[in-house]
Structures are given as structure tokens and as C-alpha cells.
Image (cartoon, helix red, strand yellow):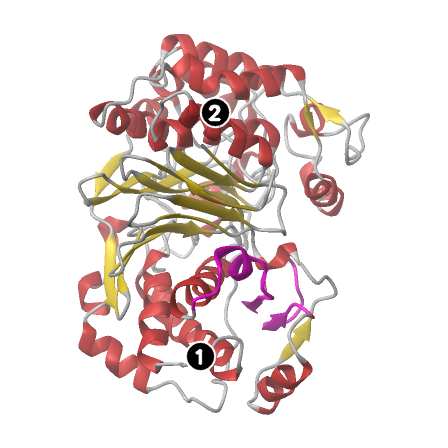
Amino acid sequence: MTLHTAGHRRGVAAAPHHAAAEAGRAVLADGGNALEAMVAMAAMIAAIYPHMTHVGGDGFWLVHEPGGKVRALMAPGPAGTNARVELYREHEAIPTRGPLAALTVPGAVSGWALALEAAKALGGKTPLSVLLAPAIKAAREGYVVSASQNALTTTHLAALEKSPGFAEVFLADGKPPETGATMRQPALAATLDHLAQAGLDDFYRGDVGREIAADLDRIGSPVTRADLAAQRAYVTAPLSTRIAVGTLHNAPPPTQGLASLIIMALFDRLRVAQAEGFDHVHGIVEATKRAFIVRDRVVTDPDRLPVPLDTLLDPQRLDAEAAKIDRRRAAPWPHKDDKGDTVWMGAADASGLVVSYIQSIYWEFGSGCVLPRTGVLMQNRGASFSLDPKALRALAPGRKPFHTLNPALAVLKDGRVMAYGTMGGDGQPQTQAAVFSRHVLFGQGLAEALDAPRWLLGRTWGAARDNLRLEPRFPDRLVDRLLSAGHEIELVPEPYSVTMGHAGAVVMHPDGSIEGGHDPRADGGAAGV
């Protein structure tokens, strides 16, 4: 599968694993729409890329409808009924692995159900059994272990192997599976097969939900059957901001979509004229710092926001924030990082339906807990809660955790609609800004924009320092200029580093043609019909 494809008329799918992109392409080829294609991709990626995402996680959608309306489909799972601070009294912070880390309801499948309701309203007719069939086959008959699954299993083995069910499903004779080996998830295959017949609601309120709840109770998770039964995805308006080239949309809280919008709004106000120079990189890095300060002050459960978010995207306020950026010097930056393993996927079809979707279990393999009766790998998104009852993101039953997840979508003045995104925790808004600025603001081809060297501000992926990391393909003169401006620079050894995320995009052009691309740093690509 190629990393970039263009000129398609019926549809395009892009994903960080080639088999997921192919699952989406096949649905589009058979007359399905982009929402149906995305459900097939979401299930498939859980079966073949489990270190990055699974059905035990959450998901967020941005959907550009054929008539031009943009909606956000939100599928976060709240903290369980028993997820009280007292449960963690022997811990200084919420554990990141094990049963006490599996403290939030998995919301992703409720998002699939809501997406299929929307798909049906737009004329979709593909049976659920057809959409889930590729994932069922891959989970039952086996998938090929990627290099990233091998590497991340090896790196985090000591923490993961202690989680209930992990070793039985994701280790081979007690060791990380080799790259290229075949692995199976038979319990997941059976679960998906059951859902294909009984419907997705069964995951929460049927036989599957009962089995999930029983396993969660057995291992000591704070999530109950009543919590599962109460889970519903919901539709809301996206957050939006206008810049010179068009309108940018992103998901509202509990996601960090606000930060992604602020970064691009501030950078747009800097009026940088040329890509790849100091002004480009320095401008986005400094905009990121200001955006993260705002994000960490306000983004939490949507029912507990301290200020109306519209005020933070007010043009006058953004003007004032942009004016505070020093165009020559780096602002001081120690900042609490947030890591995360995630998948972004995109799809578009001939009707004008464009989908930006992100699905995650948070850290690599999430909590590490695999429920034996269903094969569900539970997320550890609840680790973003605080045990301080006075904190912005204080833990309490029913509250939604903070999400680094944020799917992006832009409606441009030239008639294009672009869905884009990436994995990577705190890196998500930064990589979105790098790809969007290169492709849209500076006119680079989509493949070039996804391939170009990237940077990351922060201390993600276990790094010891809170610095600005660059891929080594940047020219020496730019690195020297950033150093002289006060940035603490570290060059990562890999020319294409997974640290910088797995970015992708699909673009609907005004003439009706569709293109898509995905990152050389991942295992995927784009496919169209």
C-alpha cells in the first residue's frame, strides 16, 4: 500500500496500518459511506494494532456532512461508580497499569454505534456483519506483529506482564512476540462476531456487557455493570476558529482540541511567510507553549469547565496572546507532559462526507488488563485524573477524564475539506500544526508535508528532560538558530521517529476528487476507489 494516493472519485481511507486502510477502502468500493468505512477500520485496527488502540478505549469523531454541517461525535467513558479517591489511599497517584488503572468505561464502541446511526441517516446500508468481518477474521486467524508492537512490548514488559490477562494474549511463551510473528485474539474475535449478530448495544447492555462487567469485578476494577449500561455516545458542536485560509474545527472537552485550535490561530497571526525556516518552527513551538498553558488551566470534564471556551477563542483574546510571543527568543518551558498511544484515521466519500476519527487506549496497551471472556483490552485513560480533590481534573465517579485525543478537520476557503490528525499525546496538536501549516499555509504536497522532519516540545515517551526534540533531517543552520534563541534542543537518532506521531490526512477537493496520505513513521498508508 502506498503512503499517498490521489485522484479518487468514490472514496479514500487513510490509517496507520495498511490492513485497516484496506478495510475502509473495501467498504467504500462496495458502496458504503465514509462513516461505515471508519467503523470497519476502527474494529480492524483493534485486531491488528493492539498496542496502539483497542475496543476497551475511547473515541472521538469529527464529521463533515454532505450539506456542509460539521458535527462532533463524542465517545468518552466516565470514571466508574467505585472510582473514588478512597480506593487509591495507598497510592500517591493513580496507577498507570493494572486493575486500578482500568477505572473508566470503554466508550469507543458506543461511538461506533452512534456513527452508524448517522451513516444510516445519510443513506448507509452496509450490514454490521460486513463491517466487522475483516476484524473478526484477523483476530481469529491471526495478524502479523509489527515492529512497533515488538518494540513497545519489550520496552514496557516489566509493567505490562503483571496486568491480568496480558501475558496470555500478547506474549509468546512469556516473551514479547517477534516482529513478523503471527498472533491471534480469539476472545476478541468471538466478541466481535457476537456483536455482528446482536448489535453494538450488546457491548454495554447485553451478553457482552455482562461478561465485561464480570471480568472487571473479578480483577478489581472500579467499573461496574451499571456503569456499562449507562454509557452513551453523544453528538455536539465542535470547537471552531477562523484563520486566514478557512475555518478549523476540533473536538470540545474533555479533549485537548482547544489547544490545537489555539496553536494554529496564534501561528496564523504571526504571518510567517515561508516554511521550514526559524520563523516557522519557532512560531509553532511558542504558540504551543501558550496554548498548553491555557489548556492545562481550563480543559476538564465538560460539566466542570471553569470558563466558557468561546471566550478563549475570541479573536481579540487570540490577538493579545499572539502579541505576547517573542519572535526571536524562546519562552522558558518546564511543562508537565502527557504521553499517549493512539490511532488517527480518516475517510471521505463521493457524497462529500469527510470523517476525522481518533481512537485510543491511552498508553501503549492501556492498563494492560485483558478481560478473558471477551478479549477486551482496557484503557488507562483514568490516569489523567488527580487524587487531589481540589484539582481541576479531580477523580470522582461519573467524571470524564482529560483526553489528549483530538481529531481535526478544516473547511478551507478554496473549497477543500481536510480531515487530519495523529497519535502522540502532547505531540498531537504540534504535529497537526506542522502538517497543516506545511500543506495548507505553505503549499507543500500532502505526501511531502507528512514526510518532512518534525519536532516535539515536551517530555513524552519516557524522556528525562522537558526539551525540544528534532528529527536529525533539519538543516544545521536551523538547529543552530533555534539553540541561539534559547531552545533546549535534542536531536533524536532516527530520521523518521515514532516519537513524532503517526500523522495522516484525507482531502476532499472542490472538483470532487479525493486524496489521502499517511505517515512513513507508521505501518499504514492510504487507499482509494
Q: Is residue 9 left or right of residue 469?
A: left
Q: Is residue 18 visible?
A: yes
Of labels 1 and 2, earlier in sequence is 2
Q: Position of residue 507 (x, y in %)?
A: 38, 49
Amino acid residing under circle 1: Gly
* Residue type (three-letter) at the residue carrying disc 2: Ala
**Segment tinted magenta in the rendering:** 443-472
Residues at badges 1 and 2 in contact (C-beta under 8 Å)? no
Compared with residue 524, is residue 164 higher up or lower down, i.e. above or below?
Answer: above
- From the image, which quarter does the N terminus lie in? top right
Q: Residue at x 40, y 19 (%)?
A: 203
**Seen in the image, is 229 located left or right of residue 423?**
left
- State the residue at coordinates (49%, 44%): 88
Residue pointed to by mark 2: 26
Q: Residue at x 54, y 50 (%)?
A: 340
Viewer-side label of 1, 2 = 2
**Which percent across, then down, holds residue 321?**
30, 80
Residue at the top extreme?
197
Numbered circle sitting on residue 283: 1
Q: Quadrant of residue 183?
A: top right
Badge 2 marks a residue whose secondary structure is helix
